[in-house]
Amino acid sequence: MITNSQIIITKDIDLYLSELVPTLPLHTHRIFQNEEENKDNFKIEQAKKVIKEAYIASSESKYIILCGNKFELEAQNKLLKILEEPPKNIIFIIITTSKSNLLPTIISRLPHKYIKSLNKKEYSNHNIFKKDLKDIYLFLKENQRISKNDAKDIIQSILYESKSLNIKLEESELLLFSKSIKLLELNSKPINILTTVLLTILNIKNRIS
């Protein structure tokens, strides 16, 4: 688990978030990114919200996650002081796609880490979104003894597949996937977790059809 402020550089921000969030204690994180049409660009409006959130007192560690393929210069300059002198119990995590997206003054304030580029071959291509109820029943029947790690791989492949198909997952659906990975880490029975996830996929298909 991340215990100090840092910059994460990754080729796929959403997928990294899906892996990061389950490792954080529940209700201890806030994610900030541009939700407008040009959502890739972290703007001054998000920077102001970050600062406001950071000054809300917390008795335990609070993770403030800033996401963007690009960060406006005005937004970065606004964040400089608080990144250098963060309030008590505040941990900043900046997630972006390239070190060059950030000012040298930002880079100098936080350690940075490169995350290995995600490769489609690392994920099992189960084509979950093409399966109907009968397919899912057979899939679950064939995988009754699935391991924890294999179940996690399937959930991650679903997230990757939804992104490649431009399927926008709702917050409640993303939360379910995050909780599922967390439950697998806590040694819940993998087949039970996978059943819930795959039935959720059917609901998603009905919602977008």
Image: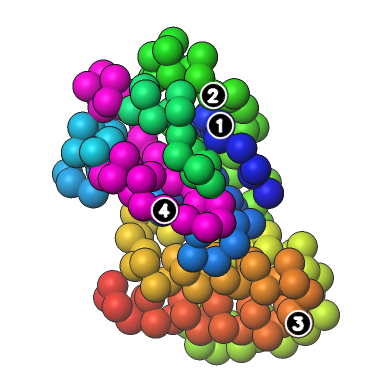
Residue type, numbered disc 3 = Lys
* Residue plotted at (27% across, 36% down): 47
Of marks 2 and 4, the one in the foreground: 4
The circle on residue 57 is 4
For mark 1, does the 10 Å Cα neighbourhood hold few (<14), some (14 to 19), or many (20 or more) residues? many
The circle on residue 189 is 3
- Counting residues from the start of the chain, the first of labels 1 and 4 encountered is 1
Check disc 1 and report its element: helix, strand or loop. Answer: strand
**Residue 40 in view, yes or no:** no
Of marks 3 and 2, the one in the foreground: 2
Quote the CA–CA distance across marks 3 and 1. 34 Å
For the residues labelled 2 and 1, say whether their Cβ atoms are less than 8 Å apart. yes
**Location of mark 2 (residue):** 110
Q: Which residues are magenta?
A: 49-78
For mark 3, does the 10 Å Cα neighbourhood hold few (<14), some (14 to 19), or many (20 or more) residues? some
Instruction: Name the spot of residue 105 as percent of width and height, x first.
Output: 42, 12
